[in-house]
Amino acid sequence: MQLIKSIIKEMRVLQWIKNLFVVIPLVFDRQLFHPVPFLRISAGFVLFSLVSSSVYFINDILDIEADRKHPKKRFRPIAAGKISLPLARGIAIFLVASSCIAAFFLSPIFAIILLLYFLINLAYSTRLKHVPVVDVMIIAAGFLLRVVGGSSLIIVERFSPWLYIVTTLLALFFGLGKRRGELATLQNTSNGQRKVLDGYSIPFLDQLITIVSATTLVSYSFYTFSAPNLPENHAMMLTIPFVLFAIFRYIYLMQIKNEGGAPDEVVMKDRPLQITFVLFAIAVLIIFYFL
């Protein structure tokens, strides 16, 4: 029983929230209440989640020594010795192999996207995560592939390409925020510091975050009045304040509270962000499906 709990913990189920980006084409192409597309996207979400869990296993296997020196990561099951390395390797192979096979029967194109996502993350885990700037761009590419994967599972009618741009920029924003949080946590610790952090500084990251956050807001604003399937009264522009506040709030948590190290954890525990996301979701549903 303890081993099963350790495996589930290592799969990082709470981080599956990132794979909700697969749902974006379903919602923004106005197919949320269509049964077949909904079921296909739901299956895609599960498969993306399982592959992402395999990536977590591989990453923790490769980083086992560094994680054991980290104040928080040393409690991860692989680093703590609760899951043996042979078992961890076996689970990682099983998760990615079974997911890609299942994805092929769902959609061959989706299977290719899923495999590409895994290979990119494998390259990230083995080498690219040590290259400053490239590392966060790889993270952003992973989120973009989630949206593209979702689009491949349904017949997209009027999905705006602006959302691909917004997704990429938003992922860059959170990726840079994560690096800033890690650097703020470990700046006084020399042992076990990730190699990539040597190529960053907090002022440099703050500059990049400023550029990306501003570009994200501009891109999303363009989407709200230029997408082909939006109401003609431009009601979608009413959602801009939610995006603006969410970005401002996350920057506040990063720079004032030093809580940007794990974006998913920040979202799960910060009430203002949660309320903002709920209100944004309600506004989108009303504008798309009831106006």
Image (tube, rainbow, N blue to C red):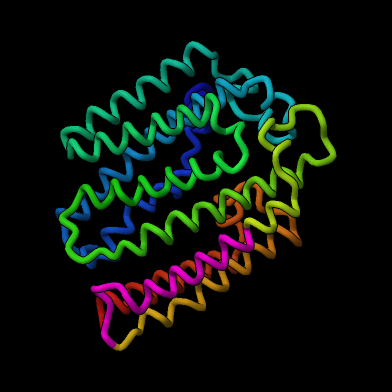
Residue 141 at x, y = what percent?
A: 43, 45
Locate the C terminus by quadrant: bottom left
Task: Say whether residue 241 is left or right of residue 42.
Answer: right
Q: Nearer the viewer, residue 281 or 153?
A: 153
Q: Residue at x 67, y 27 (%)?
A: 67
235 is within the stretch colored magenta: no
Q: Quadrant of residue 268?
A: bottom right
Does residue 43 lie above or below 29 as drawn?
Answer: above
Residue 43 at x, y = what percent?
A: 25, 43
Q: Residue at x 56, y 60 (%)?
A: 212
Task: Say whether residue 95 is left or right of residue 255.
Answer: left
Q: Residue at x 31, y 36 (%)?
A: 114
231 is within the stretch colored magenta: yes
User: Looking at this rendering, what residue extends furthest in the right direction?
Assistant: 188
Q: Quadrant of residue 46?
A: top left
User: Looking at this rendering, what residue extends furthest in the top direction?
Assistant: 86
Does residue 206 lie above or below 194 as drawn?
Answer: below
Residue 44 at x, y = what percent?
A: 28, 44
User: Looking at this rendering, what residue extends furthest in the bottom direction?
Assistant: 233
Span highlighted in magenta in the image: 209-232
Residue 92 at x, y = what percent?
A: 42, 22
Q: Residue at x 24, y 40 (%)?
A: 110
Does residue 215 lie above or below 136 as drawn?
Answer: below
Magenta-drawn stretch, dominant element (helix, strand or loop): helix
